[in-house]
Image (cartoon, grey):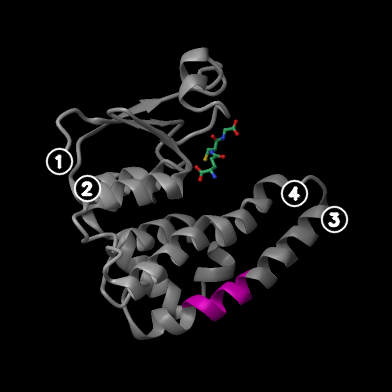
Amino acid sequence: MTKTPIDLYCMGWQDRSDRVRWLLEEMKVPYTNHFLKKAAGEMNIPEYRKLNPMGRVPTIVDGDIVLSESAAVCIYLADKYSHGILAPKMEHEKLRAEYTKWMVFSVGSLECVIARMFTHMRTPEESGETLKYVAEQSEIFKLALNPILSKQDYILSSGFSAADIMLAAVIPGAQQFLVDGNPPIEKYMKRLMNREAAIKAKVF
Ligand SMILES: N[C@@H](CCC(=O)N[C@@H](CS)C(=O)NCC(=O)O)C(=O)O
């Protein structure tokens, strides 16, 4: 357990810092939120740029460790503080491999498709193309997610892990394509949204 709280730099409760905060709450690791106001230029000040040269959030400071990229932050924190509970250890090779896949999938496959809905919606034509693309990709994501979530409560057979935090924090961005009318993911999301730590972290 840390002696000094981890510093978590974010813009609000529901930016990509949400998953980090949720994980910290699950592990009961003390942390301090630092809310940066983008409009006031607080992500551009040299002190913050030293922590994250891109001026983005989330970034954490944990002693000597300064880390950004939400998936990397969650991998690091779960390995360091969950004692193998929220992140399978390497000695459980198969589980660890699966876990790593889902941690990377959540941002590398899922979130980068969902993010198009924030950046590629400038005209009605572009919006139509983007929504079609996200809908098609969502069908592909369901091929991977649905069979697993139809037979077990969490993405790993071993139970709840940081991979569920990453997935559940990202999935609502494609609510209408992945969740609505799709019982395996609908039930999964309900299960996760009601966790005490998720509520405390104000993820949803
Ligand atoms: N891949 C990064 C994305 C980080 C990111 O783009 N964060 C957004 C907030 S959710 C941000 O800082 N936006 C401010 C900006 O782009 O100026 C992660 O997962 O942490």
Residue sitting at 36 percent across and 25 percent down?
A: 34
Work out which quarter of the rendered image holds the N terminus and state it.
top left
Callout 4–callout 2 Cβ contact below 8 Å: no
Amino acid beneath label 1: Met
Amino acid beneath label 3: Glu
Residue 125's disc is 3
Q: In 3D space, how far apart are the residues under numbered discs 1 and 4 (Cα atoms)?
A: 43 Å
Q: Quadrant of residue 85?
A: bottom left
Say if residue 199 shows up in the picture.
no
Callout 4–callout 3 Cβ contact below 8 Å: no
Residue 81's disc is 2
Amino acid beneath label 2: Tyr
Asked if the residue at label 3 sits under 8 Å from ligand 1, the reply is no
- Label 3 Cα neighbours within 10 Å, binned few <14 / some 14-19 / many ≥20: few
- Measured as percent of width and height from the top left, residue 159 is found at 26, 72
Residue sitting at 33 percent across and 81 percent down?
A: 152
- Measured as percent of width and height from the top left, residue 161 is found at 30, 63
Callout 2–callout 3 Cβ contact below 8 Å: no
**In the image, which residues are magenta?**
138-145
Q: In 3D space, how far apart are the residues under numbered discs 4 and 3 (Cα atoms)?
A: 10 Å
In the rendered image, residue 64 lying in the magenta stretch gets the answer no
Horizontally, residue 3 falls left or right of residue 118, namely left
Residue 120's disc is 4
- Quadrant containing ligand 1 reads top right
- Measured as percent of width and height from the top left, residue 142 is found at 55, 76
Q: Quadrant of residue 139?
A: bottom right
Numbered disc in front, either 4 or 2: 2
- Measured as percent of width and height from the top left, residue 14 is found at 44, 42
First in sequence, mark 1 or 4: give its number.
1
Depth check: give the residue in front, 3 or 165: 3
Horizontally, residue 65 falls left or right of residue 56, namely left
